[in-house]
Amino acid sequence: MVEIPVRAEVTVAPEFPGGGAWRQVGALCEATAAAVAPVVAAGGVPVVFSGDCLVGGAVIAGVQRAGVDPAVVWFDGHGDVQTVETSTSGYLGGMSLRLATGAHPELYADAFGLRPLAPERAILVDARDLDPAEADYLATSPTGRITVAGVAASAVPEGKLVLHVDLDVIDPADLPGLKFPVPGGPSVDEVLAACALLVATGRVAAVHIACSWLPPTDEQQRAYREEVVARFADLV
């Protein structure tokens, strides 16, 4: 269980079925989408925290259930565009964006009613660590790529947005203890500034923060994470 130091108004804790990882992911995503939808329908902007990126598709589905057809701005140190066929590790989180844009719907989207986004309705921010298969896919995909410094209202898809931030987009020197650290990234302040710019447009329908980190090593690290999480929670 990932420790996320946030005081949540709603905690999603579904009963997980047997039958393998995909069914468990589907149950978690269904419960998350059901929690997101009424907040969006009431005019709110939910901020969802989770342990990995697979919940990003559930946040999109919840926004869709509220009658909004969003695009997604996907901040991540990685591409998250693997498929079952291309992944060399089998790590499902490394497929998250590709699943949200239509890969393997029978395993993912169909389980919780996600209408997969057209690839051009997604844009990757940073993604500085790509496997060869991901680089090949993105070279011809309509999914765009920009840097954190290049984030601007004119650089992302039109209309309402789901803002997804995997915290491993941040340089590990500024956020130690990440599961999959990628050196050479932006600071916490730089990522927050880019997110705030998009929130200020009034177009963000929901925010998803993936806390892809290992258990804290000491109280100082725990306290720092609490500060970082609070700053992202205060985006909206």
Image (cartoon, rainbow, N blue to C red):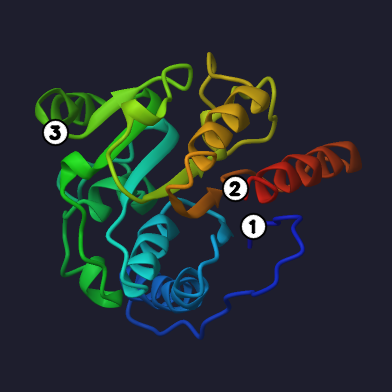
Name the residue beneath numbered marker 1: 2
Which one is earlier in the sequence, the residue at label 2 or at label 1?
1
Secondary structure of the residue carrying numbered label 1: loop
Q: Residue at x 64, y 74 (%)?
A: 11
Residue labelled with disc 3:
142
Residue 133, x across and y down, in percent = 18, 30
24 or 165, which lies in front? 165
At 54% from the left edge and 35% from the top edge, which residue is drawn? 195
State yes or no: discs 2 and 1 in contact (Cβ < 8 Å): yes
Q: Residue at x 55, y 65 (%)?
A: 44
Instruction: List the residue tagged with mark 2.
Output: 211
Horizontal relation, residue 161 to residue 95: left or right: right
Tag nearer the camera, 3 or 2: 3
Q: Is residue 227 above or below residue 3?
A: above
State which mark lies toward you, 3 or 1.
3
Residue type for callout 2: Cys
Percent from the top left, x then y, of residue 107? 21, 68
Q: Residues within 10 Å of mark 2 (few under 14, many from 20)?
A: many
Q: Residues within 10 Å of mark 3 (few under 14, many from 20)?
A: some
Label 2 SS: loop
Q: Position of residue 77 (x, y in %)?
A: 45, 29
Label 2, label 1: how far apart the Cα atoms are: 8 Å
State left or right for residue 100 relative to residue 162.
left
Tell me the amino acid under the disc marked 3. Pro
Q: Earlier in the sequence, mark 3 or mark 1?
A: 1
Q: Nearer the viewer, mark 2 or mark 1?
A: 2
Report x, y in % for residue 159: 30, 47
For mark 3, give the secondary structure: loop
52 lies left or right of 102: right
